[in-house]
Amino acid sequence: MTKTTNHKAWYFVVPVVVLVAFNALIPLMTVVNYSVQETFGDNVFFWEGVKWFEDVLNSDRFHAAFLRQLAFTGMILAIEVPLGIGVALSMPRKGPWVSVCLVLMALPLLIPWNVVGAMWNIFALPDIGLLGRGINALGIDYNFTQQPVSAWMTTVLMDVWHWTSLVVLLAYAGLCSIPDAYYQAAKIDGASAWSVFWRIQLPKLKRVLTIAILLRFMDSFMIYTEPFVLTGGGPGNTTTFLSIDLVKIALGQFDLGPAAAMSLIYFFIVLLVCWIFYTLMMRNEEQ
Amino acid sequence: MAKISLEKVKHSYLAQPTAPEDYALKQIDAEWQDGGAYALLGPSGCGKTTLLNIISGLLVPSQGRVLFNDADVTQVPTTDRHIAQVFQFPVVYDTMTVFDNLAFPLRNRGIAEAKVQKRVQEIAGMLDLESSLRRRASGLTMDGKQKISLGRGLVRDDVNVIMFDEPLTVIDPHLKWRLRSKLKELHKRLGLTMIYVTHDQTEALTFADQVVVMYDGTVVQVGTPVELFEHPNHTFVGHFIGSPGMNILPCEVENGTVRCAGHAVQTASSGRPGSDAEKTEIGVRPEFVRFDDHGFPVEIIKVDDLGRYRIVEVRYEDQRVKMIVEEDLSIPSESARISFDPAATRIYADGWVVN
Ligand SMILES: Nc1ncnc2c1ncn2[C@@H]1O[C@H](COP(=O)(O)OP(=O)(O)OP(=O)(O)O)[C@@H](O)[C@H]1O
Ligand SMILES: [Mg+2]
């Protein structure tokens, strides 16, 4: 069979190329532009080569923010994934309660980031917030605006509240797609509830969990609005995650060169981690 | 090992069944002798899977009792019933090797590892799975996966009954034939009770000593393949078993005489249908219809040559009759006269035989 070639077909791709160029490539090129030059305004630029990249990679400030970021992402993944699976497992599979549960689960996902931040800020205030007062009433000294541990706890809790639902919904969809025959076979084979989970449910959830983890990783690794509204990166710098730090450098200090270099490094880290994760999962799949 | 009885079992998937149509099983009384090889035969949707699930305890019947050796087990959970069941579509535990899959039912029951090894090797040998024992089950073909499912059913030796729910649907015909022979052989060797669900009559007739025919949520007949062929209790059995199926022809009964399209027909039924019967029919298999100069006139519409015999389709009024004609007999060209062998012709009233 001979393939017919029709180069005119390329014209159909043009709109997409233009769109991607304007909303992604060209803005990104500006960042690249800033990352290798020094500017003092007035459109005067001096070539700096890779200096900004070296500076950023060697700076203690970047290392600290990066570690905080890793710790935060690690923590929320470690909480949200198992919790999400647990909640999905305990949700009813049929009956009138299904829709009630689904709506309840979807609610937090519908709230805008800054509103979540503001809500939790007020909720957790030690003098007027319900959570803050409640914890203090239990005799625990809690003040997220002053204590790093409290600030971290609140930030993590807020993220768990906001995003566990995503894992729940994905896991629930995965669970619903397991044919009944698997559960029946497990009963016939005398499998315990744990075996059913470990040998049937978890393996069948692998694909959706891969997606859930990827989404939660990317999202939390780039988190900005919620902690910014809640703690503003404080107390001190204790909740200054990568993107908050980036904004501080770029807009607070107006160091455009280092900020651009940092953006690119940041971007490549996210890309790299996603790629590694995806490749690993897919290789596992092929076995 | 046990005798299994079902007493007045009814089942509906609805919460509040009212009409008879709401029941997937209308009323089942059945007995499965210890060590029997049974086939459960019936069209799609007649309730075969439902019946198996009730025996294995995956479903609790809406009404009625399930007895194992006369002990009521209706409320006993599946695990304690000692039952193996193989489903229509393969179920394998993806993350485990083939060996671990086969060993799974045994290990769950805390059987000593030495015995597990021995049983699994034995079953794997029987199903030609030895070479893939170390492989991950998820990588196998459909055939291979279904063999694992079969293997998990066969590996236990403490079972009361092994039930196969159309287990060979997904398997290619050649392997199907081999596996079926294996199952049959296994039945002879181990003497386990086996119930084999199918809607393929050849499969049922070759596998089973006793065939249970189901239709629309009821058991219409239980018998050996020969009994089902020679004495169908219900027009459905006559129609479903045999190839081609039994001819079912409307008839009138007047003063004890049976007439088809005005012609008197001799039958083996000595009784006569009650006057309340809404529908009276005669049933005669194509094997027992022959050309006869003294019979009633028909028009020949089709002849199928199948080698050793021919299937001739004839017509009178708007009824079609199939007949099997030996190779060497000549067939009249257009019109002919036929008659039915009285010994093999029976009256059916509302579907049920009149003896
Ligand atoms: N889980 C269920 N919920 C509701 N109705 C069901 C369910 N399972 C089966 N039924 C209905 O019960 C009837 C009997 O179904 P069953 O699966 O027992 O038939 P079957 O004889 O096994 O058919 P097949 O040969 O197609 O497997 C069918 O009408 C079916 O629609
Ligand atoms: Mg079925």
Image: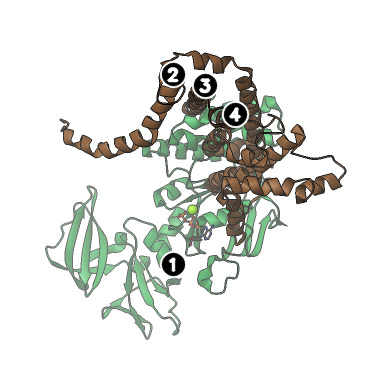
Chain colours: A brown, B green
Q: Could you tell me residue B127's position as x and y percent?
A: 50, 31
* Residue tagged 3: A258
Q: Does residue A28 appear left or right of residue A95 in this picture?
A: left
The residue at which mark 4 appears reads as A245
- On what subunit does the disc labeled 3 rest? A
Q: Secondary structure at mark 4?
A: helix
Q: CA distance from mark 4 to mark 2?
A: 21 Å
How far is disc 4 from disc 3 in space, using C-alphas?
Answer: 11 Å
**In front of the other: label 4 or label 2?**
2
Crowding near pointer 4: few (<14 within 10 Å), some, many (20+)? many
Circles 4 and 3 on the same subunit: yes
Q: Earlier in the sequence, mark 4 or mark 3?
A: 4
**Residue B49 visible in the snapshot:** yes
Mark 1 → mark 3, Cα distance in angstroms: 89 Å
Name which residue lies at 55% across and 18% down.
A56
Mark 2 = which residue? A37
Q: CA distance from mark 2 to mark 3?
A: 10 Å
In the rendered image, which residue does mark 1 sit on?
B234
User: Residue drawn 67% across and 37% down?
Assistant: A79
Q: Residue furthest right?
A: A139
